[in-house]
Image (cartoon, rainbow, N blue to C red):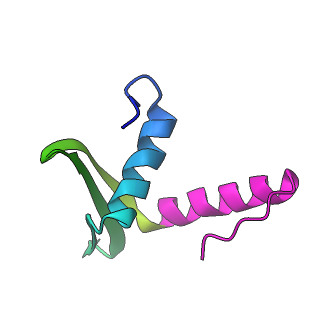
Amino acid sequence: HTNMKNNKTKSLFYSIRCGFAHGSFNKVKFLGEQFYFFENRYRNKIRGRIVVKEKTLLKIIEIIEKSAKKENYNIDVT
């Protein structure tokens, strides 16, 4: 595991990645909005928990895809 404490952006991406990769996420509708709850653990200790609105998560994906196209990277997050 990489120490992400000093970089909030890397920590955010790392938590989202781990949540999806290890199935440690949940999607909940609250007051008409969709939220994603992510949790990542290491050796059974909670390393991070975050809550992200679905529209924010989709915007992050859009920004990454646009940046990748600009830099001519061939990625597909679907």
- x, y percentage for residue 75? 71, 65
Instruction: Note whether 54 is above or below 8 in the view shown.
Output: below
**Residue 34 placement: quadrant:** bottom left
Region of the chain picked out in magenta, as a range:
55-78
- x, y percentage for residue 45? 13, 42
The residue drawn where x is 33% and y is 65% is 36
Instruction: Note whether 24 is above or below 50 in the view shown.
Output: below
Main SS class of the magenta portion in the image: helix
**Residue 61 placement: quadrant:** bottom right
Q: Nearer the viewer, residue 27 or 73?
A: 73
The residue drawn where x is 16% and y is 44% is 43
Question: Hey, which residue is sitting farthest left in the picture?
Answer: 44
Instruction: Note whether 23 is above or below 38 in the view shown.
Output: below
- x, y percentage for residue 26? 26, 70
| Horizontal relation, residue 46 to residue 60: left or right | left
**Residue 29 placement: quadrant:** bottom left
Q: Is residue 64 magenta?
A: yes
Q: Is residue 13 magenta?
A: no
Q: Nearer the viewer, residue 52 or 64?
A: 64
- x, y percentage for residue 4? 41, 31
Q: Say how many tags the image has.
A: 0
